[in-house]
Amino acid sequence: MDTKKTSYTIKEIAEMAQVSRATVDRVIHGRGTVSKKAYDKIKYILDKIDYKPNIVAQTLRKGELFKVAVLMPDSDFDVYWKRAIDGINKVVEELSFIGVSVDLHLFNPFKEISFNHHAKQILKGGYSGVLVAPVFYSEAVAFLNECKKLSLPMVTFNTHIKDDNVLCHVGQDLEKSGRTAAALLAKLLKAGDEYLLVHIDEDIHNAKHIQEKEDGFLDYFSESGGRNPNIHTLKIEDTKELEKRLLGVLDDHPEIKGIFVSTSKVYYVAELVHSYNLNVHVLGYDLIKENVDFLNSGHIDFIIYQNPGLQASTAISLLLDHLAFKKEIPKLKYLPIEIAIKENYMDYITD
Amino acid sequence: MDTKKTSYTIKEIAEMAQVSRATVDRVIHGRGTVSKKAYDKIKYILDKIDYKPNIVAQTLRKGELFKVAVLMPDSDFDVYWKRAIDGINKVVEELSFIGVSVDLHLFNPFKEISFNHHAKQILKGGYSGVLVAPVFYSEAVAFLNECKKLSLPMVTFNTHIKDDNVLCHVGQDLEKSGRTAAALLAKLLKAGDEYLLVHIDEDIHNAKHIQEKEDGFLDYFSESGGRNPNIHTLKIEDTKELEKRLLGVLDDHPEIKGIFVSTSKVYYVAELVHSYNLNVHVLGYDLIKENVDFLNSGHIDFIIYQNPGLQASTAISLLLDHLAFKKEIPKLKYLPIEIAIKENYMDYITD
DNA sequence: GTTTTATTTGTGCACGAGCACAATGTGGCT
DNA sequence: AGCCACATTGTGCTCGTGCACAAATAAAAC
């Protein structure tokens, strides 16, 4: 219906400015030498018409247009990342025909040095953009600064590092995620019941991550007016300690009827609920195999799904929107907090 | 890493067959005349190497490659469809540079004649594919048969018509969706509580749609071993009847503590729950404004979200995968049954 | 065998961008 | 003017496909 001019071609611009195509090309790319008179005339036209190169023609001409690097954990160390890798490959496959190529740099998520090693490689790889899952905070910030020097645009996903140099972050609103967890458990429990918040993680770097979820969880109750149940907290850094400490807390506080595990390690808790036939409701994160099994057996009531596949594919799409299509992209993109139960989880993990 | 040959070019094929590019072109497109000898030789090579044309070059050459028609309800009559339209526009915007154009044919979802009118238009529009929300069953089947005659591939979304001529359907597994509804309500209710199933719809054509949800809901309880609560049913075709009949049932069966509304009209029920301060849990479909308001006020506990935007964008992506990229696409694509509560619905409806 | 007609095959250009190379123009210096 | 250095601009080809048109070959008619 609206027949707005798609975009001008270099040839058309050249005719307007009464110069040759090559001169226009020189102004656009700032290479070679152009007389001030010609430069001004062409620049004026370019600004006025908002010239955007024809990606199709560009892609046909040069084989590869953009090379982007992905820096994220290797799923061999943590299966959580498997779907993220799949999500990236799916998008890349669909967009490879516009000359996009992606190199996966997979690091060991338990070793900072592995992250740094791959980061260094990326810096000298000649990329036009990077996608990072910045699980190591300070290392990621250092890498980000290096990227800035090379004016390499960076998009992050999964873990949020609040830094203005990040072009865009894709993830979940963790505070809201904790709040959702609280609301779900509250639906199952009665007034007077108590809650237990369990943090299970061997890695310290997740501290902030986890803190936000806890804040959201607590805020839900403090804001929900009046009803302020007893909420207990357990921090487990070594899973071997879990059994003794969890049983201890539950023994001391028999009114605990809901357990919120702030990480994907919720299956450790579910295992104990199963073994000791505990009368509590359990909620945790991520649809990894172990958790799915306990969803099915009924020992986990709800799983909050971060949808790493969608996160990764959204993130890379946005990066390419920026690189290839020069589109404006948001600084922050929150994806839905997806609630999975036994009856609906299937559709999330089958493609 | 894997440097597999992307695809052969016509020029390369021509050299292999020792003919000119044009002859290869003639075999590929089946136009003009080609000697049997040349035809056989070229055909043999084509089959062996699985030639796929370079879409980039094709797009550069011809401005518009594919024209697809979308036949769906106008959101002016039912806001539910607003997000579907947005979802389609988003995909088209991203893919317009590969020469895809989309015409929206929006019909009045309360008038079969409007559907037929637009369907007829599409048949003589010279399209290469159609995307349909087949809310009118028999009309849709008739249209499908016409499309088949023109070998126009059709993808459907939202409403499922089981017909082998449909290239692909994108939607929710309604049986599972009803089952999920049951499971959620069951989490809130106690043993001994009774359930009420309410169907509210002015249009008869949704009958099958709704029946599947009901089946799922009932199956959940009959399969969950032992516990078989009383489940009452209410069919409302005129919303004016709702108040009297709902209050009547609740009066007769005070043990009803959970109401499952199988359509997006759940806000009618929530309104009554609010007015009469009824002590029941309510679950229904779709994040339309009215329902969101009652989620916020606490009169609706859960909303199952069909995500029409995602349905539509997935559907059109698949159609274009088929048309443009000659990719194999599934006959059926179920999207997640998304569970929304007051705390997490926001991320679903903001983009 | 020659001309006419039908069949089959090949060449060249366009799409838009990018870049190598060639071709102008401008100034200084002898 | 003649010559060289350097600044500035223009031409022509490539990428792969599709199609108009021309050219070559084969078959039929005289």
Image (tube, coloured by chain):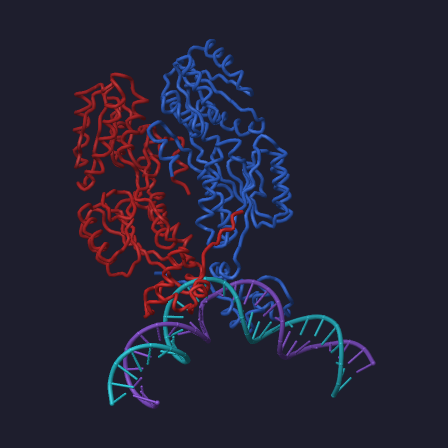
Chain colours: A blue, B red, C purple, D cyan
Look at the image and tell me whether residue A194 can be seen.
yes
Q: Is residue A163 above or below residue A276?
A: below
- Measured as percent of width and height from the top left, residue D21 is found at 38, 78
Q: Is residue B198 above or below residue C12?
A: above
**Residue at x 41%, y 59% (from the top left corner):** B53
- Measured as percent of width and height from the top left, residue B192 is found at 25, 16
Tell me if B71 is positioned left or right of A126 in this view: left
Q: Is residue D7 above or below residue B252?
A: below
**Residue at x 44%, y 18% (from the top left corner):** A271
Look at the image and tell me whether residue A6 can be seen.
no
**Can you say which quadrant of the picture contains the C terminus of chain B?**
top left
Tell me if A83 is positioned left or right of B175 in this view: right
**Quadrant of the rendered image containing residue A27:** bottom right
As drawn, the residue found furthest toward the top would be A252
Tell me if A294 is positioned left or right of C20 in this view: left
Front-lying residue, B317 or A5: B317
- Measured as percent of width and height from the top left, residue C6 is found at 28, 77
- Measured as percent of width and height from the top left, residue A281 is found at 39, 19
Front-lying residue, B127 or B11: B11
**Residue at x 27%, y 37% (from the top left corner):** B264
